[in-house]
Amino acid sequence: MRASAICGSLDAIGLEELGRMGRKVHLCPGQTLLWEGDESVLVGNVLEGMLKLSTVTGDGREQIVGIVFPSDFIGRPFGKDSHHSVTALTEARVCVFRRGAFDGFASSHAGIEAALLRRTFDELDRARRWMLLLGRMSATERVASLLLEMIDRLGGVSGTPLSLPLSRQQMADLLGLAIETVSRTMTRFEREGLIALPGGRRVVLRDRADLERIATG
């Protein structure tokens, strides 16, 4: 995981220095690490589990705007306030740093600054892809795209059960769909042999090629 984390560019001395600054935090499902609108006092790397990024709409509803996977970086370095809440979807472990201390460390380590810049561009690319997904894709294409992203980011392989971090309702909220539409689409994928649904949130990928064909329209 270190290779894909933001600290992957550091040598042994840099890692030791960064390690002294951080602490590991265990989160239970539903526990919030950062709150939207609060001062951005923490940043960190996800070690295990999955978290959601969410915001509250004008009428008080929660809108999930992103999913955070192991090795992903959370928080807003060099920023004042948090633009969204960060909440655990599953049991999770996060290595957190005080933002001020991390900002100072990053300013003196060019590799970290470059990694933060790459992260920013990666997030921009994901945001643009998500705009395309929500604005142009059909409901079926959206569900297929989200399933593939979760399977890939969680290291799922064909034929092996994988527990999805999102409920059907959360998938619907993220995709801008009704829960009934998500449920019907998942059932259709199972009926057509693309996936199996053993129960709960578990899914088994059966036909990746066809699922990818649907996701790309």
Image: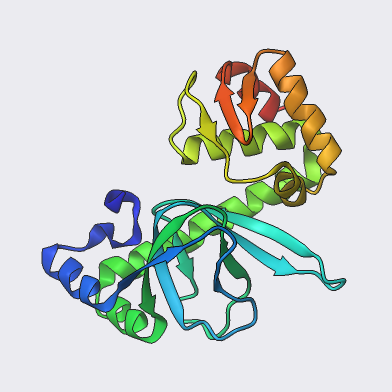
- In front of the other: 123 or 87: 87
Q: Is residue 32 above or below residue 5?
A: below
Residue 93, x across and y down, in percent = 40, 60
In the rendered view, does 43 fall on the left or right side of 1? right
Residue 116 image-quadrant placement = bottom left
The answer to whether residue 216 shows anywhere in this view is: no
Residue 145, x across and y down, in percent = 65, 35
Residue 71, x across and y down, in percent = 39, 54
Residue drawn at x 78%, y 33% as measured from the top left? 183
Residue drawn at x 49%, y 18% as measured from the top left? 159
Residue drawn at x 48%, y 41% as measured from the top left? 153
Q: Quadrant of the C terminus?
A: top right
Residue 101, x across and y down, in percent = 33, 84
Q: Is residue 206 above or below residue 140?
A: above
- In front of the other: 145 or 120: 145
- In front of the other: 200 or 81: 200
Residue 137 image-quadrant placement = top right
The answer to whether residue 20 shows anywhere in this view is: yes
